[in-house]
Amino acid sequence: MIIFAPAKLVKMVEIIVITALIIAIGMAFLLIKVLFRSNGSFSSQHIHDSKAMREQGIHCVMDQDRELRTTGRLAVKERNN
C-alpha cells in the first residue's frame, strides 16, 4: 500500500489542475475559431485541396500511386466497381 505524503499529493493535484487548464484553453481557442468562421468549419487539410501544392505539382500519394499503376511499362488495367 502506497501512502502519499501531503507534499506529493499537493504537487500531483497542482500538475493535474495545470494540465486541465492547458487543455481547456486549447479547446476554447478551437471553439472561438469555429464560432467566428463564416461556415463554422475548418478548411480541408488534404493535399489535393491546396492551391499552392497543386501549383508545385505535388498531389496526394494515392493519386500518385494510381498514376503509376495505370501508366508506364508495368501498367495494370484496373476495374471500376
Image (cartoon, rainbow, N blue to C red):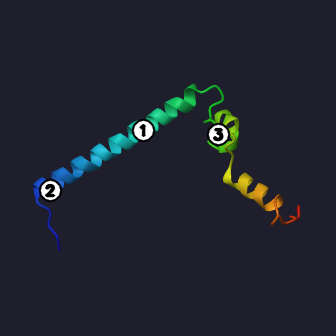
Residue 54 location (% of width, % of height):
70, 38
| Three-letter code for the amino acid on which mark 1 is drawn | Gly
Q: In which quarter of the image is the C terminus?
A: bottom right
**Of the numbered discs in the image, which one, if any, rests on residue 8?**
2
Q: Residue furthest front?
A: 73
| Element at label 2 | helix
Residue plotted at (39% across, 43% down): 23
Q: In the figure, residue 25 lies in which quadrant?
A: top left
Left or right: 51 as drawn, with respect to 76: left
The first of marks 3 and 1 along the sequence is 1
Q: Locate the N terminus by quadrant.
A: bottom left
Mark 1, secondary structure of its residue:
helix
Residue under label 3: 44
The nearer-to-camera label among 3 and 2 is 3
Rate crowding at label 1 as few (under 14), some (14 to 19) or many (20 or more) other CA atoms within 10 Å.
few
For disc 1, the marked residue is 26
| Residue in the picture at 65% in, 39% down | 44
